Amino acid sequence: MAAKPWWSWLFFYSRTPEGVTQRQWKVLGALGLTYLVNSYDLGLLGLALPQIQQGLDVTESGLGNLTGIVRLGVLPALALNILADRIGRRRLLLVTLLGFTICTFLTAFCRTPVEFAVLQFLARMFIYSEEMLAIVVVTEELDSHARGWGIGLMVAFGAFGHGVAALVFSQVDVLPYGWRALYFIGALPLLLIVWFRRTLEETHRFTEQARRRAAAEVPTLMLDPLRKLLTRYPWRLLGLAMALIPVSFAVGSALQFQSKYLQEIHGYTPANVSMLFLLGGLLAITGGLLCGRASDRFGRRPVLSAAIVINAIGIVGLYNTAGYVLPMFWIMVIFTQFGIDVLFAALGSELFPTSYRSTASAARSIVATVAIAAGLAAEGLLYDALGSHSAAITAMAWCSLAAPLLLLTLVPETAGRELEEIAPDDD
């Protein structure tokens, strides 16, 4: 086994699988750092939602629509990921990094809800594409016994990004220009990330697949990956989507409104929210890596099913309790949510061949994000009907319990199997 890099000790709570090479550590470090920066930007909207609402004069019932529109940035990300299946993962990773940084920087200067929605829609397009590509690269680079762990490591890096966002958010009332300063800060790591990303090589599997395609003189039509995805493994795609939809529909609003709920209902200050996210988050961030490692051993489907059930219970507890027990439910929700993200990402990448794995990963994210957007819109309607965000989110939480049955019935197991065995490439 290659020597571990210094940053690996941040994840001391999870045993590293045998046989991780120096090249694989380098890939994990480069992608993890970008995952961290992406997650900083993703975390800002949820943390600073009350401040953004006030600063842009967004109505209470309009919050769900605003955040739902922003999340729909995943839709055009599909085109970028199709392109990644044609010209390579590395090139698109660089493009997406630059695009999201520019949009994040410009968000600091928006004047209206429409400008904010447009800029964050575009930022999410690049962020979602980059994160999907990162998962694809990890899936293609790591051995079968370590893929769940590797994807969990990316989500753990993302958790640190949310922690940085929480730390900076604690100063939102002190920083000049308030929430706008948070987005300005989010653009600062660009040069570091670009330099680090230049060390990233194309994956062996994509290089070999491209070589075979060139040798066979297979036409490289732009929409070929999407056509293959829809015609060669349609039942896998449908089964994964059916299992993912109820979870995303139920959980999206619970996560989006957590900071607002804590501040407005329980009297948390921005500093209190940041303290919870930092201290409680130190426990919660282990969820992705530990669930990923457990799924390498016990299987993706049983570990994911357990995480979904516990997550639903945690959401109901979070939005219906108070006092010292409330942070415990918050930790339960975030811990399991990291695990859910890891395992759906793993399944979405492993179930499909190299020639359209990036497209499949994008399709999975689109399904999840559309379901989240629908959930946010439904939350707005339920808020009007039930009178509170707590009641609306609680009513929606139980929907996710349909997912384990669908998952165990419709989705094949992928843990411990080589990618070529799960889905042979026929190019």
Image (spheres, rainbow, N blue to C red):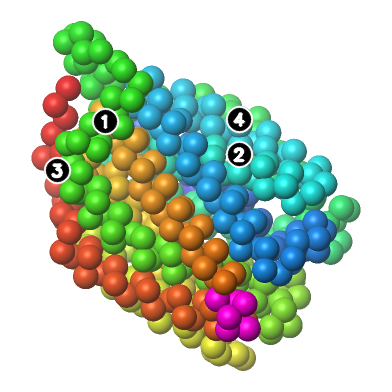
> Is residue 387 positioned above or below 128 on the image?
below
Please name the residue that numbered disc 2 is placed on. Answer: 122
Whether tag 2 and tag 4 are in contact, CB under 8 A, the answer is no
Q: Name the residue under label 1.
A: 227
Residue at which label 4 appears:
98
| Badge 4 element | helix
Main SS, magenta residues: helix
> What amino acid is at disc 3?
Ile
User: Where are the magenta residues, as a range?
Assistant: 382-387
Q: What element carries label 2?
A: helix
Task: From the viewer's side, name the closer residue of 154 and 223.
Answer: 223
Res 269 quadrant in image: bottom right
Point out the frontmost of discs 2 and 1: 1
Q: Nearer the viewer, mark 4 or mark 1?
A: 1
Residue 407 within the segment the image draws in magenta: no
Q: What residue type is labelled 1?
A: Arg
First in sequence: mark 3 vs mark 2 = 2
Which three-letter amino acid code belongs to the residue tagged 4? Leu
Q: Do tag 2 and tag 1 residues touch (Cβ < 8 Å)?
A: no
The residue at the far left in this view is: 421
Marks 4 and 1, the one that precedes in the sequence? 4
Query: Which residue is at a point 86% across and 61% down the rendered structure image?
Result: 174
Quadrant containing the N terminus is: top left
Q: Which amino acid does label 2 sit on?
A: Leu
Q: Nearer the viewer, residue 222 or 193?
A: 222
